[in-house]
Each structure stands twice: as structure tokens, then as C-alpha cells.
Amino acid sequence: MHIEIVTLFPGLLRGALDYGVLGRALERGLVSVGLEDPRSHTSDAHRTVDDRPYGGGPGMVLKPEPLCAAITAAATRVPAGSARIALSAQGQLLTQAGVAELARLPGLVLVAGRYEGIDERVLELMIDRELSIGDYVLSGGELAALVLLDALARLQPGALGDERSSAEESFAAGLLEGPHYTRPEVFMGRRVPQVLSSGDHAAIRRWRCKQSIGRTWLKRPELIGRAPLDETQRALLQEFLLEGSVRVTGEQTTGSR
């Protein structure tokens, strides 16, 4: 997968590309990344890429000429069928399902905005969709681009040490992951659940599924509403809640964990 990032701060991105799963994916050739600076498409001595907004107001807006030229240049280096995406606070919220959809594309052009925003005509003429990584405001789209890059790299075959990891992570099935444990078996008086050292793989899978559903109910109940539980999952949830003295009453819970 080849990804081009249009950014005013390519150095900010270069410094983060050598680490972790993303760094390994780049090293193995599973993902490649190019950077395109709109400043290289300016013609004035000051390399101007922004200007005051029409109608007044605070801040500056990214000019359409250098930005469109940068997007066009970046688009020539990605395969046919690639999408052009602007990272924007007003974009559709990025989800794991959305990441999986994008990971199936041959490439992407990511546009990192800055200042008060991008001239609307750039979005109308050059962008296929806008994405947001959360309901908050960043100083620019570079950090959002890195978040998306990392999420995409994890889904490339061969990027992770164990291919089961991406399938079992939080949100992969619309639920949170259950708890994880490692040695020592007892730490500060707290023991690893016995089932995990039982060797009974069916029991371990059932326990992990129950913990995943229960943890999602307690920490992110809105996820349950998006993907209603089947009969088996509801039985596991009831068991989880009863073990913690919590009962399901319609959409309410009573008791405590």
C-alpha cells in the first residue's frame, strides 16, 4: 500500500516513521510513504501557502493554488483506485471498520490541514472524503495522519508478529478486548484467573469472549447498541454481570463490580 501525505511539516512526520509496527511495515515494504509540501508549489519569495479568510474572522486559511498542486503531484505517485482524504475535525469519525475498508485500497493521498482550515474549493474539487479521529481540535492534520497510518499498517499482512493479533484486538469485532495477564502469577496479592493456566482452550476462549462482552458493557455500552448481541453473547453477558453482582434490567444495571 502506498500512501502520500500532503503536509506543511514533512519533518514532523519523518521523525515518527521509524518506530513500532509502522516502522517495521515500512522496512518490510508492506507500506510505503511519500511526503509532498505545498510550499514547493508556490512562486513567491515568501512561499506563501495561506491568506486571510473572506468575510473576516480570526486565523488564516490554506490557499487553493499550492494545495491543489501538491495534491495533484502526490496523486501521480499512488496507484489507480486510491482515495484522496482530508484529515478534518468536520469529517466522518474514523472507526476500525473504516480503517479495514481503507486498508483494502491500493493507496491513499492524505491531506493534513493547518491554521483555520482549507479553502472549501479544494475539498470540493480534490477530496473524496473527510475523516476525523475524534471530536476535538488539533493544531493540524499531521498527528491524525500518523494515527491513520499506524492503524492501516497493523492490518497489512506480515506487519504483526502474530496475525491473530489484529483479529483479536479491541474493536475488531465491534467489542473491547478482555483483560491480559503475564507472569508473575501473583502480583501484590492479585492472582491471574485460574482458567488462563488451565490448558483448557475452549474454556479460555469462552472466558475471553465473556470478558470482552462484559468489559464493553461496563466501559463502552454504546458499542453494544451498534452491534446487538446474539443469544449466546447475551447469556455470557448475564453470566459476567451476575459474577460481579450486577443484573441487567432492560438498559439499566444494578449492583457493583
Image (cartoon, grey):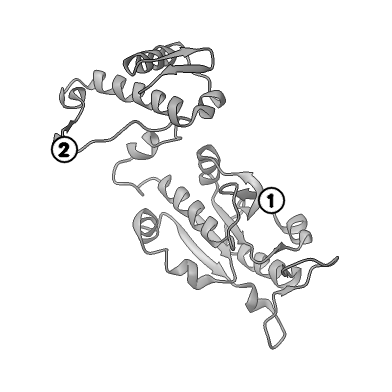
Res. 250 visible in picture: yes
The residue that appears at 79% across and 68% down in the rendered structure is 53
On-image quarter of the C terminus: top left
Q: Amino acid at mark 2?
A: Phe
Which image quadrant is residue 187 in? top left
The residue that appears at 47% across and 49% down in the rendered structure is 152
- Residue underneath mark 2: 187
What is the x, y in percent for residue 169?
38, 37
Q: Which mark is drawn over residue 142?
A: none
- Residue underneath mark 1: 128
**SS for callout 2:** strand
In the image, residue 29 sits, relative to residue 218, either above or below, namely below
The residue that appears at 72% across and 85% down in the rendered structure is 44
Give the left or right position of residue 129, taking residue 96 as reference: right
What is the x, y in percent for residue 109?
60, 58
What is the x, y in percent for residue 74?
61, 65
Give the left or right position of residue 206, taking residue 16 as reference: left
Q: CA distance from mark 2 to mark 1?
A: 51 Å
Q: Earlier in the sequence, mark 2 or mark 1?
A: 1
